[in-house]
């Protein structure tokens, strides 16, 4: 067996950002980044809470990977 990866896709559309001052636009981008990162952390916590545990290897191998350029999170596990 190999690595398991799950991708959950969502689209966030922000309109009229060009009307915001640069500081507000940057703050909004940072907020969205933090929300996506927190969602990844929450998915890891949830997966670790529901996975069967015999040795703990699978639970410990669960991860989330944040793609900062696309604001995407991949959830996976490296254990068989």
Image (cartoon, rainbow, N blue to C red):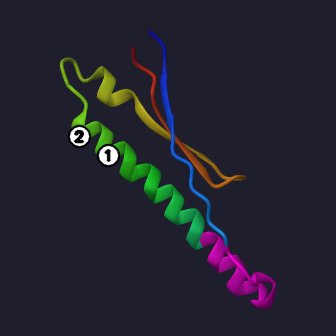
User: Does 18 sit above or below residue 61?
Assistant: below
| 20 lies left or right of 43 | right
Q: Residue at x 30, y 21 (%)?
A: 57
Q: Nearer the viewer, residue 16 or 33?
A: 16
Q: Residue shown at 39%/27% (left/top)? A: 61
- In this figure, which residue is indicated by the disc labeled 2? 49
18 horizontally vs 77: left or right: right
As helix, strand or loop, the secondary structure at mark 2 comes to: helix
Extreme residue in the right direction: 18
**In the rendering, at what x and y percent does residue 66 appear?**
58, 47
Q: Which image quadrant is residue 44 in?
A: top left
Query: In the structure shown, which secondary structural element does the residue marked by tag 1 occupy?
Result: helix
| Residue drawn at x 70%, y 77% as measured from the top left | 26
Query: Is residue 24 shown above or below 50?
Result: below
Residue 11, image x and y in percent?
61, 60
Q: Within the magenta stretch, is there residue 46?
A: no
Q: Crowding at label 2, few (<14), some or many (≥20) Cα neighbours within 10 Å?
A: few
Image mark for residue 45: 1
What x and y, as percent, mark residue 18?
A: 81, 84
The structure residue drawn at horizontal position 63% and vertical position 77%, both measured from the top left corner, is: 28
């Amino acid at each position: 067996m190999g690595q398991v990866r799950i991708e959950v896709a969502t689209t966030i559309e922000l309109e009229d950002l060009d009307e915001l001052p640069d500081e507000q636009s940057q703050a909004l981008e940072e907020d969205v980044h933090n929300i996506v990162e927190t969602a990844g952390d929450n998915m890891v916590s949830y997966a670790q809470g529901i996975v069967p545990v015999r040795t703990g290897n699978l639970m410990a191998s669960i991860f989330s990977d944040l793609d900062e350029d696309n604001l995407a999170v991949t959830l996976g596990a490296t254990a068989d």
